[in-house]
Amino acid sequence: MIYLVEDDGNIREFVLYALTGQGFDAQGFEKPSQFFAALEKQIPELVLLDLMLPEEDGLSVLKRFRAAPATRHVPVIILSAKDTEFDKVLGLDSGADDYLPKPFGMLELFSRIRAVLRRSQQALPPREYRAGALLVRPAQRETLVGGEKIALTPKEFEILCLLLSHPGLVLSRGQIQDQVWGMEYLGETRTVDVHIRSLRQKLGSCGELIETVRGVGYRLATPR
């Protein structure tokens, strides 16, 4: 699945039509809020992202996307009318995998997409995480304990994925806050404790896998 975030309806429909014609599954969004809502249901293989968007600019969207553990490794290609060297460097340094200025040819776009997907396939994160009776599928945003689905909030899910991706490693409250809420978040680290407490309760018997390291933070224990 490819997600396209583009507020220009003509460009959005044309690119989606071309992608589906090439055999890609694709879905378009006019606003960042629609895009982030869709991420709660399915994680795409690739994102095509415009920079000049309503609600918030594309670079802000990209930073939020990269900060979330579930989407950190999903490749992003920026499609933008901003075509200066500075804009390209800024986009790539902000976390984009490629930058294609508008107007662009569809054949070049298809070539860029295939190249980025090839690179991403070589370093894919696990399709799922397992720890004892706990099973988490990031792409489907599914959490199961003993085969039974558990409903988690977006932040709880991201915290869990972050801990699962660093088994045995102690993560401070500040690190968890920066990775899940973003470095711009000015709230207290106590928010992390509240989410961890709720996460443990929802995971039931698997909640004990999340260990508190007094005075530091939390880690995911290796099941015995």
Image (cartoon, rainbow, N blue to C red):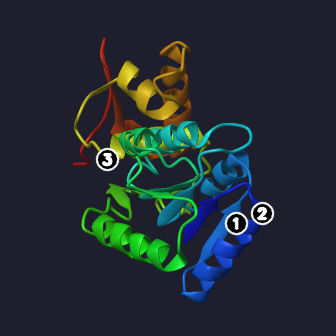
**Toward which corner of the image does residue 108 lie, by quadrant?**
bottom left
Residue 127: x and y, percent?
38, 65
Report how far apart the C-alphas of labels 3 and 1 lie in the structure: 34 Å
| Crowd class of label 1 (few under 14; some 14 to 19; many from 20; radius 10 Å) | some
Q: Which residue is mark 2?
A: 9
For label 3, the residue is 165
Q: Point out which mark residue 78 bears.
A: none
Q: Is residue 23 above or below residue 54?
A: below
Locate residue 10: give its quadrant: bottom right
Which residue is situated farthest in the front direction here?
84
Q: Indicate the position of residue 190 as horizontal and vertical percent values.
A: 51, 15
Q: Amino acid at mark 3?
A: Ser
Q: Residue drawn at (62%, 50%), measured in percent from left and top?
A: 151
Nearer the observer: mark 3 or 2; the answer is: 2
At horizontal 40% and vertical 44% (from top left) the residue drawn is 85
**Quadrant occupied by the N terminus:** bottom right
Answer left or right for 174 relative to 215: right
Instruction: Quote the CA–CA distance across marks 2 and 1.
Output: 5 Å
Residue 187 horizontal/vertical position (percent)? 56, 14
Label whose residue precedes the other's in the sequence (3 or 2): 2
In the displayed structure, would residue 25 be above or below residue 119? Answer: below
Gap in Å between the C-alphas at discs 3 and 2?
38 Å
